[in-house]
Amino acid sequence: MSATPTPLPIVPVILSGGAGTRLWPLSRGLRPKQFLALGGADSMFAETAARVSGGPFAQPMVICNEDHRFMVAEELRRLALDWSDIVLEPCARNTAPAIAVAALRLLETDADAIMAVLPSDHVIGAPDSLREAFAVAAEAAGDGRLVTFGIPPARPETGYGYIQRGDPLAGRDGAFGVRRFVEKPDPATARDYLAAGDYLWNSGMFVFRAEAFLAEMTRFHPETVANCRAALVAAESDLDFLRLDEAAFAEARSISIDYAVMEKTDKAAVVPLDAGWSDLGSWAAMWELGESDAADNVLAGDALAIDARGNYIRSEKPLVAAVGVEGLAIVATDDAVLVVPKERAQDVRLVVDALAESGREEVVSHTRVYRPWGYYQNLDGGDGFLVKQIVVNAGAKLSLQHHNHRAEHWVVVEGEATVTNGDDTFVLGANQSTYIPLGAKHRLENRTDAPLRLIEVQSGDYIGEDDIVRLEDTYGRS
């Protein structure tokens, strides 16, 4: 029986819903690790999108949560990449429902669609090798296989799941059957897997026909597929985004693709991938990826190591000096410092859990918070006041708004601001300022082609981001 010809192009489905808790304090809820430049000069999301542009690839589909939608759109625009959809998940339901939504969406227009499912927070050191592996995987997917990529293990890693490779697939050089998927092992078992030679790390990347995946997903979890279909049918377009129906999607079971399908199906296949892959899942992984000094220290930012060995030391702002320590990950931002032995780097999530339980803001956001128009950064604050730096991108503007509990004073330090203050609209240059009384409608615009930077001083009986009444908003937040 001849194989079905592989339809082209392949549709990249980029999953961008993770929180990256093990890379706290750098990765946080409102700006998780996929939007950080950790493995290169650009963010991992941008590098993922760039790797699957052109050639056999169609416009990508992105699945993300609502809080990250503007960052996703801005990254794609910055790369000058068109996209088919940016689908917003109203709640987290793990990978299987997200992929089911993507498959259903693709099948609306292409019954033969082949999809490549890609996490947005992985590093690939050899993109050409990945493209070659995609070609092999697409051929196997054309035969109805659900293909994953397995990474040849470099060490007895306990932080990854494993795939035991089976026999070669007939007529598909480079692709194999799957004997079994196994959970993250203990150290002794991981050493056994490494010695056996037929175990691969589970990369979390997949290639399959949308129809083939949905058939297996329906076979094992029909209710979840029905929930996803209902969420898509009732979805609403919002600017550049497609919002899934919250009530329907919330009914879908929260389950990973591995548990839902790959560990059960008899159609699984694996393509070994040796492409310098890392999921940067911990600070220990960052140490392995980084360039070390003679004492095996990896230093990033304003960091100093004396009589120290095998450490990962990173500073985003203050000088960090380490003396006489070994095997630590030390990470400092302007509002938090983490110190953990590298062998316990997976336990950083325990810190995040403890902070979340106590309601600490450091879990959710940095002092710098990104918005679709630019960003603001908290500089100082106290009882009844807050000082911010605000940067507005060229051509961008904030919403027309007012506050019920605070007044504001704006001082322009760079660029040119067009200000609406009550019934007046005027222009302020560097070293000029204006006062926004409590309750006055106001708007800040940058009508130039250069960034606008100003200092905002808030004062009042309540200082909080929820004291914003939007009257008009370019970004659909009114």
Image (tube, grey):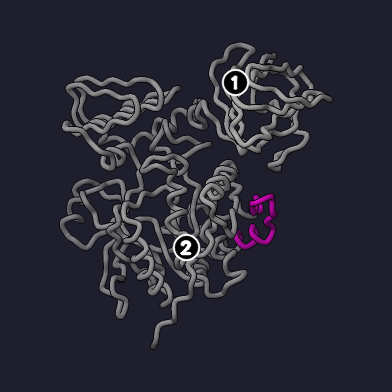
Mark 2: amino acid = Gly
**Whole-percent x, y for residue 291 in the image:** 25, 38
In depth, the one of 446 and 321 nearer the eye is 446
Q: Is residue 85 above or below residue 111?
A: above
User: In the shown orientation, is residue 303 left or right of residue 421?
Assistant: left
In depth, the one of 182 and 27 nearer the eye is 27
Looking at the rendered structure, which numbered label has been put on residue 356? none
Q: Residue at x 43, y 52 (%)?
A: 48
Q: Residue at x 52, y 28 (%)?
A: 368
Mark 1: amino acid = Val
Residue 5 lies in magenta, yes or no?
A: no
Quick one: SS at disc 1?
Answer: strand
**Whole-percent x, y for residue 26 in the image:** 42, 33
Q: Is residue 351 above or below residue 281?
A: above
Quick one: SS at disc 2?
Answer: loop
How far apart are the alpha carbons under marks 1 and 2?
A: 42 Å
User: In the shown orientation, is residue 466 left or right of residue 369?
Assistant: right
User: In the shown orientation, is residue 297 left or right of residue 97?
Assistant: left
Disc 1 target residue:
413
Disc 2 target residue:
54
Q: Residue at x 55, y 22 (%)?
A: 378
Q: Is residue 430 above or below residue 2?
A: above
Residue 244 lies in magenta, yes or no?
A: yes
Magenta stretch in the rendered image = 227-247
**Whole-percent x, y for residue 373 in the image:** 62, 36
Q: Residues within 10 Å of mark 2 (few under 14, many from 20)?
A: few
User: In the shown orientation, is residue 397 left or right of residue 257?
Assistant: right
